[in-house]
Amino acid sequence: MEDLLRPIYQERASDENTLGVLVIEKMKPNSPITDNLDVILLIIVKDAIQPWQVKHYEFDEKTAAMHVITNELLMKWIDTSGYRKAVAWLIYGKVIFDRNEFIANLKEQLREFPQGKRNLRKAIEFGKLIRSYSDAKDLYESAQYKDAYSRIVHSLHYLARLAVIEKGYHPEVTAWSQVKQIDLEVYKLYDELIESHEELNKRVQLMILAADFVISSRAKVSAKHLLDVIKSKEDAWTYGELKSDPRVAAYALDLMAMIAYLIEKEIIQTELTETKGAGVYHRKYTIDSGR
């Protein structure tokens, strides 16, 4: 198959704008990593008018997709989990062109997973976790047990991804196989939910209680990126200031859910300042220096 693709990628490889080319082949009948196409051709470039272009091909009853993506967008996907398949492509793809060891260095960065990038990814997953967990509790209290079960499963998936990131790895699509090897506490939560013979409402109730303890014990570590942003300013932040700070852009949609949870756990504190309206105050957020 690589021979058939060679004319396509050789033309790209001769262009100095091209940094690297990888091939990802379908290895089993159901192949989410390749969108069930027979092969993915990933071409990484320095610059492009369109940051991400995709073309589909068919040859000898085989199907292929060529993804041309800028390095800037690829790094954004990696750092923020914007497109999960991108990490899998880099990990499992076969390198067929590598200008100045660009892809080799990129793979090394993935293995190292620097602490700053790790903290950002943890904050992103933590925000999704808190929102999903809050939804699960609300649905349970409304006696919508099937929907609550669905949300608690989602919550455990976010918790699993957090556990993988905490250990210094990029979470793959099959996160639970990773979690089983590196964090039995989180894996057992999922196993107990799925394997339990209790009534559905009882299963959800027990899992909400168990998950609350696990989430609470990891909150400071998981939210470190946000807490560091808050600490970077001596004065308290208004919500508008925090939301517009580019450092939190990747999890801005879940920011309020995170703040509410961290206030509940007394990790973030509130300050009130007077407005022109009698009895109405601006609410600001800060962290006690002694915490």
Image: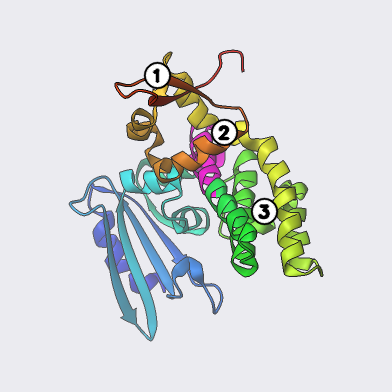
Residue at image point 75% right, 49% down: 210
Q: What secondary structure is marked by label 3?
A: helix
Q: What secondary structure is marked by label 2?
A: helix
Residue stretch in magenta = 109-128
Q: Which mark is residue 238?
A: none
Residue at image point 54% right, 77% down: 30
Quick check: is 279 in the magenta stretch? no
- The reply to whether residue 113 is visible in this rendering is no
How far from the left and from the top, in percent, is residue 3? 38, 72
Q: Earlier in the sequence, mark 1 or mark 3?
A: 3
Q: Is residue 11 left or right of residue 185?
A: left
Residue type at tag 1:
Thr
Residue at image point 34% right, 33% down: 246
Q: Is residue 210 left or right of residue 251?
A: right
Q: Which mark is residue 262?
A: 2
Find the distance from the CA under tag 2 to the CA under tag 3. 28 Å
In this view, the residue in front, 159 or 275, is: 275
Find the distance from the CA under tag 1 to the CA under tag 2. 20 Å
Residue type at tag 3:
Gln
In this view, the residue in front, 128 or 67, is: 128
Taking the view exactly as shown, the residue that stands out farthest to the front is: 278
**Is 114 located above or below residue 37 in the figure?**
above
How far from the left and from the top, in percent, is residue 130? 56, 46
Asked which quadrant contains residue 65, the reply is bottom left
How far from the left and from the top, in percent, is residue 236? 43, 19
User: Overall secondary structure of the magenta stretch?
Assistant: helix
In this view, the residue in front, 276 or 202, is: 276
Q: Which mark is residue 273?
A: 1
Residue type at tag 2:
Leu
Q: Which mark is residue 178?
A: 3
Residue at image point 61% right, 28% down: 266
Kindly report which numbered mark, 1 or 3, lies closer to the viewer in this rendering. 1
